[in-house]
């Protein structure tokens, strides 16, 4: 596994090996030390790792009737492609459940593999039954109609000061989420791949009785 050339490490391979912490460590080693929002965006519907590419949406609260309901929400899901992760940057607003079963179904039909919502979701049980990963700050029963709407799609957005750009690699699990800028993706993926292999070796050494201090002295990983 450790000798796979970086350009040959596919998203499918990452899903078998990666988790948020090891990707964060790889980014740390490249000097990118703030690529994970310090927020409780928790997995509402599934466990395991979500890996894909950012499909970004920027949301705003509404306090009047929307003249074009759901216009850009529908555009966003209809233009998803394989391995997209829908990023809903709503500034943490819990005014409504902006992501739910029907949007998940439409997005899945286009190849979307999950959603990350800086706000609230709803329809948790149906999404869980579908096996659609949804990370969010929490839930809200209210419909987004006339309460929140997408104002822009496919633009850089921020969650807790961390920038998510269209096409960036994103990794999310129960520990948190990490975004990898495209400019350093190949090197970050390569380092994460190498560290996964090295951690497997050190884990085996510890299980076989080697002391933690000896493992760290030998491999520099713990």
Image (spheres, helix red, strand yellow):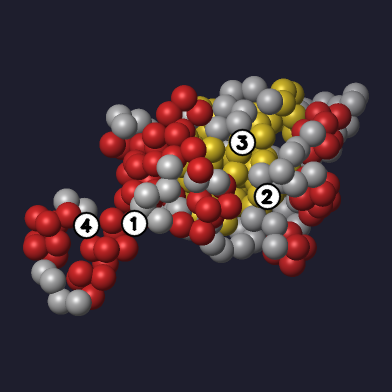
- Gap between marks 3 and 2, in whole Å? 10 Å
Q: What residue is pinned by disc 4?
A: 222
Q: Are dots 3 and 2 in contact, CB under 8 Å?
A: no
Of residues 198 and 150, the one nearer the viewer is 198
- Gap between marks 1 and 3, in whole Å? 26 Å
Say what secondary structure mark 2 lies in: loop
Numbered disc in front, either 1 or 2: 1
- Residue 206 lies, in percent from the top left, at 20, 71
Image position of 122 with respect to 57: above or below: below
Residue 29: mark in rendering: none
Task: Report which quarter residue 212 is drawn in.
Answer: bottom left
Mark 4 or mark 3, earlier in chain: 3
Q: What residue is pinned by disc 1?
A: 197
Task: Report which quarter residue 202 is drawn in.
Answer: bottom left
- Residue 5 lies, in percent from the top left, at 43, 42
Of residues 53 and 176, the one nearer the viewer is 53
The answer to whether residue 103 is visible is no
- Gap between marks 4 and 3, in whole Å? 31 Å
Relative horizontal placement of residue 166, taking residue 171 as reference (left or right): right
- Gap between marks 4 and 1, in whole Å? 13 Å
- Gap between marks 1 and 2, in whole Å? 26 Å
Q: Residue at x 50, y 51 (%)?
A: 14
Q: What residue is pinned by disc 2?
A: 113
Image position of 177 with respect to 182: above or below: below
Q: How many dots with numbers? A: 4
Q: What residue is pinned by disc 3?
A: 54
Q: Are dots 1 and 2 in contact, CB under 8 Å?
A: no
């Amino acid at each position: 596994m450790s000798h796979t050339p970086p350009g040959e490490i596919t998203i499918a391979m990452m899903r078998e090996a990666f988790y948020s912490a090891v990707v964060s460590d790889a980014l740390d080693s490249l000097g990118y030390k703030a690529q994970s929002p310090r927020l409780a965006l928790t997995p509402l519907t599934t466990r395991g790792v979500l890996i894909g590419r950012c499909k970004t949406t920027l949301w705003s609260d509404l306090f009047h009737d929307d003249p074009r309901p759901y216009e850009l929400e529908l555009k966003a899901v209809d233009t998803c492609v394989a391995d997209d992760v829908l990023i809903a940057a709503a500034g943490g607003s819990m005014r409504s459940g902006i992501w739910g079963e029907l949007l998940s179904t439409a997005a899945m039909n286009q190849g979307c593999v999950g959603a990350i919502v800086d706000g609230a979701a709803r329809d948790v049980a149906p999404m869980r039954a579908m096996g659609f990963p949804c990370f969010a700050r929490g839930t809200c029963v209210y419909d987004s109609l006339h309460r929140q709407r997408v104002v822009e799609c496919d633009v850089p957005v921020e969650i807790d000061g961390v920038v998510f750009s269209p096409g960036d690699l994103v990794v999310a699990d129960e520990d948190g989420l990490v975004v990898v800028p495209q400019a350093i993706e190949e090197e970050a993926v390569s380092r994460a791949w190498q560290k996964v292999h090295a951690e497997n070796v050190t884990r085996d050494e510890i299980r076989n009785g080697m002391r933690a201090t000896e493992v760290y002295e030998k491999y520099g990983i713990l």
